[in-house]
Amino acid sequence: AQTVTQSQPEMSVQEAETVTLSCTYDTSESDYYLFWYKQPPSRQMILVIRQEAYKQQNATENRFSVNFQKAAKSFSLKISDSQLGDAAMYFCAYRSAGTGTASKLTFGTGTRLQVTL
Amino acid sequence: NAGVTQTPKFQVLKTGQSMTLQCAQDMNHNSMYWYRQDPGMGLRLIYYSASEGTTDKGEVPNGYNVSRLNKREFSLRLESAAPSQTSVYFCASSARQGGTQYFGPGTRLTVL
């Protein structure tokens, strides 16, 4: 079974600075997808960024980018120019490229990000 | 375009009571999912529906039933609620199995 590990329960960053959230995963599959979701206090789960394992190029989405290291099974999220609105819980998630129950998302336990002035 | 909607937002039940959580999506998605979120555990899949007319168990299905009423709606039923079912429940949908999943706002359920 796949597992996702987020080893940083909490992180803090100053406004306008850069922060990196870590995520590692364990799988025997070669084809899969990785995601970062943001969960603000409103509780809504918001997709931040997505990475296909077959793509070597790291995904970027405005101020958000990932460092995908397939061999190391590492998938970190970098937030540049941090803003107060970035404060939230961030979840790393894995999904197999298969179907059926394989299409479920496997989540890490989350990293709570604080943004200070 | 509301995306994925869930009702109710909050609910308190007594042990043994039953209730149904409602989920609807207006994105014409084929696949829908129910997850639960417990403190320190991330989200876990309860049931999913790959397409209209089909449902399958996920990781933690015990104590729950689901109905895919039509393409838009996917409900989750607790027949006899237990304190262990106190959690936040999320519905999600994707255009197809394996597609990116989009989540509703969640339902916070407390079972006393």
Image: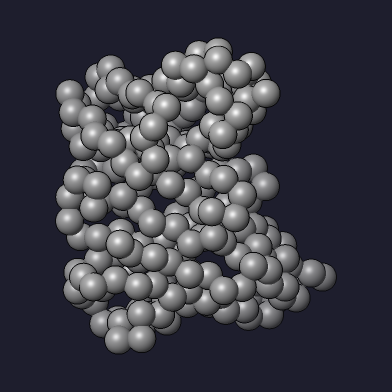
Residue B40 image offset from top left, x and y in percent: 60, 55
Identified at 35% across, 73% down, the residue is A26
At 31% across and 50% down in the image, what residue appears? A104
Left or right of residue A21, residue B45 in this image: left
- Does residue B112 appear to the left or right of A58 in the view shown? right
Percent from the top left, x then y, of residue B46? 38, 38
- In the picture, the quarter occupied by the N terminus of chain B is top left
Displayed quadrant of residue A74:
bottom left
Asked if B21 appears above or below A103 in the picture, the reply is above
Q: Nearer the viewer, residue B47 or B79?
A: B79
Judge whether A38 appears above or below A63 on screen: above
Q: Residue at x 60, y 65 (%)?
A: A111
- For this orientation, the residue located farthest to the right is A117
In this figure, what is the number of numbered marks? 0
Q: Is residue B67 visible?
A: yes
- In this picture, is B41 found above or below B91? below
Q: Position of residue A17 (x, y in %)?
A: 68, 80
Q: Is residue A108 left or right of residue B59?
A: right
- Which quarter shows the C terminus of chain B? top right
In this orientation, which residue lies closer to the viewer: B22 or B76? B76
- Residue A101 rendering spot, x and y as whole percentages: 24, 47
Residue A49 visible (yes or no): no
Q: Is residue A16 left or right of residue A116?
A: left
**Which image quarter: residue B74?**
top left
Residue at image position (17%, 50%) is A99
